[in-house]
Image (cartoon, grey):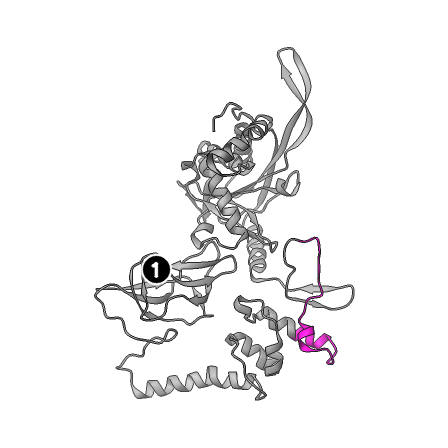
Amino acid sequence: MAKIELLMPKMGESIIEATILKWVKKVGDKVALDETILEIATDKVDSEIPSPVGGTVAEIFFPEESVVAVGKVIAIIATEGSEPPVASPAVKEPDIQQTASDIESNIAKIQSDVLIPALETVSQSGSDDRFYSPLVKSIAKKENISHSELGSINGSGANGRVTKSDILNFVTNRGNISSTTPAKEINQPVYSNQNSTSSPPKAFTSISGNTEIIEMDRMRRLIADHMVMSKQTSPHVTSFVEADVTNLFQWREKNKNRFKEKYGENITFTPLFIDAVVRAIKDYPMVNISLDGSKIIVKKDINIGMAAALPTGNLIVPVIKNADYLNLAGLTKTVNDFARRARENKLKPDEIKDGTFTITNVGTFGNLMGTPIINQPQVAILATGAICKKPAVLETEYGDVIAIRQLMFLSLSYDHRIVDGSLGGSFLRRIADYLEKFDPNTTI
């Protein structure tokens, strides 16, 4: 009886648009509640978008490969009892009241904006069925790239689609390599690293035998912009403490096999760190805030972001919502699930937004400490260093003794506009206290 608008969803901090990769459902198709209706891609994650209601796809407003702003209506879903129109999957059915002059104007515009540039871009030597975005076609026309050259480019996008980086890389290579070199050889990477577990960047230009220029991918450009913006926005201060986590370390070593048997999950140090951070945030809620001009926004939810490295070398931060409601088993399951799906590029848009505090585990890479950059609009971020055996002085009833202990550095970067040294230092010390006072008799 009703027509429901399907909006391009918000997919995290600083993301304002997404690309429609594939319409899983077409106009006239039935769709169930929460059934996937389309696939989208952003600079951070590729996602499947479920239908908010059950019904029939009545209208689709954007074709595949369209870049659409967050919040825009991308489709109409007719619920039971309404009469969905039969329309093209990519084009909205025109209003029957539209005048003849409007129709003629639209046809002329399509010919001018799409058909003519496309015909001018490729030569008459042949045709292929590959999809080329308007931007790629525009660059091809400007650079006088023939049909055969365009077809020879190895696309790095979905289904071999030629991206902006691919064609710009081809243009640069074409100007630096002899014309006798076959086009397909021009676009092949010469970079190799047999010891690397991740794929090398696909878009690069070899200038000489000693220099290479590697084109940033979209995600890396976004990260770069976000990091620069954070440093320009917040005056960063970093405090450090060293924590004795011997009890925690020994408890994990003793119980990790039993934990795996009981819950089916490998327990790492990350959920133990998150648990301590959550406790400290409850003691110091003014760290769990954001700043809007001169207004302090205190967050009641404790949503912990965990920085995860991707196989590409980029970074993504899935967010554990309401982490204070999860026990150690729940935190472990969530951390492992996010880490696995981050590596597989299967995180959902809602899982990388609304964080209130972030943890980055630099100890994973053998680093003792770090000075992390704040994940805006948050006001603090914690870096956890590697746990190392060190001699330490212990106070006993018989006097001071030197013993081998498991020690680690914690570093907290915070926004000095709103978090002063007293609050930042006290909060960091409280995290260390919770880690040091971990009960070695904690039951699983």
Q: Quadrant of residue 153?
A: bottom right
Quadrant that contains the N terminus: bottom left
- State the predominant SS element of the stretch in magenta: loop
- For the image, the number of numbered tags is 1
Q: Residue at x 65, y 10 (%)?
A: 398
Q: Residue at x 54, y 70 (%)?
A: 161
Left or right placement of residue 257 versus residue 213 in this view? left
Q: Quadrant of residue 388?
A: top right
Q: Amino acid at mark 1?
A: Ser
| Residue closest to the eye, 15 or 391 | 391
Residue 236: image location, x then y, percent: 58, 44
**What residue is disc 1 on?**
51
Residue 436: image location, x then y, percent: 56, 27
Write the start and end of the magenta stretch as one range.
171-196
Residue 287 seen in the current view? no
Residue found at the far top of this picture: 398
Q: Quadrant of residue 187?
A: bottom right
Residue 95 seen in the current view? yes
Q: Residue at x 66, y 75 (%)?
A: 184
| Residue closest to the eye, 357 or 336 | 336
Left or right placement of residue 127 versus residue 354 in this view? right
Which structural element holds mark 1? loop
Residue 46: image location, x then y, percent: 48, 59
Q: Residue at x 47, y 70 (%)?
A: 65
| Residue closest to the eye, 424 or 48 | 48
| Whether residue 394 is situated above or below residue 76 in the rendered picture | above
Residue 108 falls within the magenta-colored stretch: no
Residue found at the far right of this picture: 209
